[in-house]
Structure formats: structure tokens, C-alpha cells
Image (spheres, rainbow, N blue to C red):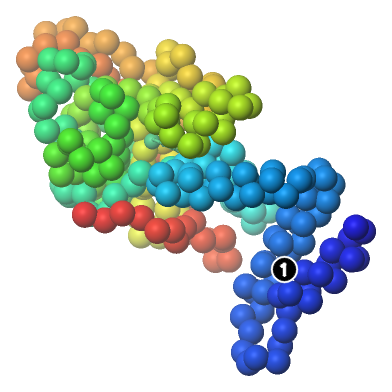
Amino acid sequence: MDRQTIENVVKACNVDTSEGPVNARVQQVLVRLVTDLFQAIEDLDLSQSEVWKGIETIIDIAKADEFALMGSAVGLEHFLDLRADEADAKAGLTGGTPRTIEGPLYVAGAPESTGFARMDDGSEEGKIPTLIIDGTVTDTDGNIIPGAKVEVWHANSHGNYSFFDKSQSHFNLRRSIFADENGQYVAQTTMPVGYGLNPEGPLQGVLNQISRHGQRPAHVHYFISAPGHRKLTTQFNIEGDKYLWDDFAFGTREGLVATAVDVTDEAEIARRGLKGPFKHIQFNVVLQKEKEGAPSTEVERRRASA
Ligand code: MBD
Ligand code: FE
């Protein structure tokens, strides 16, 4: 079938203005996606069985609650970041900490504090190193931003996130920390371990067929926001992880690699109120100032809230 014939079929099925009001945007997107799908079926000469297999696979992925993960896995989330970077550059917005993917595991409503938060519930104490994360929030001119809201979330020693992993306590490893009067935030937590897809799940089943793993390097997610500044969605990925540059979700970016430094100095341990050696990561955040006509960095998507 040629393109025109395909377009005619799609229009005959999906463009009918006789039934009342039409959402033109929905119609435009639907017609385009269906046309491109039909074109792909034509170009790849898919059999009917292959088409149904594909649809069933997507249904299985959605039923297993892995549909958003598929967005990470095929690079959709990363692609949207690259488009946002391009739009920013076009609008003359450069500098500051790079953005990277949010991922599907944020939960709204985490406990709030100013300057400092302990993020872990103590249940993995002794099993996994303590991690101190600290940093300063500034703008691209180097001015500190006291009161900036730093939302942080990460996985436990099994690579699992509270709320989605019901064995963890409420809001474990999730906090909102407002930067203090010096623009500083400090988090006491535990070293995250990289997330891995369910090896038995339908999404990993697809990745297996193209020889791809479903692993992320150890990482910590951030939303950083402050009045008059562009909200930043980002994360750091931790140096030394086997998957640092082999992330199934393509979240690792230059400028977002953090080094965890071992701290054994007794005075430093005491100053932090800790009992023994810990790991330290500094992650400073630089926000862009809000600018008239800048693309919005607020992304609406369905998020859990607890
Ligand atoms: C994660 O922890 C994550 O950050 C992404 C992007 C996808 C799956 C799990
Ligand atoms: Fe994550």
C-alpha cells in the first residue's frame, strides 16, 4: 500500500466531523500515530500474528505496571530531555546543572525539613554504608538560593524504592529539604544500589530478545525548585558503578556523575554525629533564573502521592 492509500484508510476511520465537537489536537496526534503505525506494518510487512503478538506484549507490560518503565527503557524519557535541551538552547537558556530523566518512581508528599534530613529509617544500618550528601543551591551567577526546595529520592540496598516496595516504611529514602540561609542542604542516608527490572517481567522479556539488560547504576533523584527559578529535574549517578555508562534508562549524563568519597577521619565522623566511617557525596545544584518566554520545566504526569 502506498502512503496516500494508508492516509485515506486512517482518515476514513478516524476523521469524521459529523458527530459534533472534535478535539483537533487529539485527532491530529491520533491520525499521525496510526498512520505511522500502519506505514511501519506495511514497510516491515508484519504478519497478522506479529501485530497481535506486539499488542499482547504491550498489554502484558501495562498489566505488570511496566508501561512507564518501557518509556525509560526505549529511551523515550531521555529523548524528551534532549528535546527540552534543544528548546532551551533555542531560547538562549544555557548553563546550570543538566537535567536528566525523572523516572517513574517519584512519590509526592515526602516529609519536609530545612537544612538537614535523615532519609533512611535505620532498617539497613550496618548492612550498607551511611551516605552523607551535601551541596549548595545557587543560580548561574553564583548567588546562593536560600530556601530552595530540594526533593530527593533513591533506592535501598536492593535497588528498590519505598511505596512501590511495600516492605519499606512510609517515605523511606524520600525527603524534601529546604536549603538553609547559606543555600546548603545536607542529607544523611544510606548508599543506594542500582535499580534492576524484574528479571521475570514482560519488559525484561522484550529486552532479552535484543540482548539488553534492565539495570541502572546507583543514583539519587532530585527535583529542585525556587521562586524565580526554573524547576530542575535531575539525578546524580555514582562513579564506579558497573552500569554508570551502560544505564538501561539512559539517565547518566556528563556533569551528573558523583564520586562517593570514604571518610574515616574521627573528627569528621564526630562532627556529623555518626558512629563510624561513612561515604560522602557533594552535589551542588545550579538553577537557571526564570525568563520571560522560556519553555516551562513543569512536567505534568501521573505521579504517586502518599
Ligand atoms: C529507576 O529507578 C529509574 O530511575 C528509572 C528511570 C527507571 C526505572 C527505575
Ligand atoms: Fe531511580
Q: Is residue 77 visible?
A: no
Quadrant of picture, ligand 2? top left
Instruction: Identify the residue at image location x=27%, y=10%.
Output: 262
In the rendered view, does 108 fall on the left or right side of 76?
A: left
Q: Judge by depth and name the residue closer to the eye, 247 or 132.
A: 247
Q: Which residue is mark 1?
A: 31
Q: Is residue 172 above or below residue 237?
A: below
**x then y, percent, for residue 23:** 61, 80
In the rendered view, does 67 fall on the left or right side of 175?
A: right
Q: Is residue 157 above or below residue 290?
A: above
**x then y, percent, for residue 240:** 43, 13
**x then y, percent, for residue 94:** 58, 45
Q: Judge by depth and name the residue closer to the eye, 198 or 102.
A: 198
Q: Amino acid at mark 1?
A: Val
Q: Is residue 183 above or below residue 188?
A: below
Q: Is residue 179 above or below residue 253?
A: below
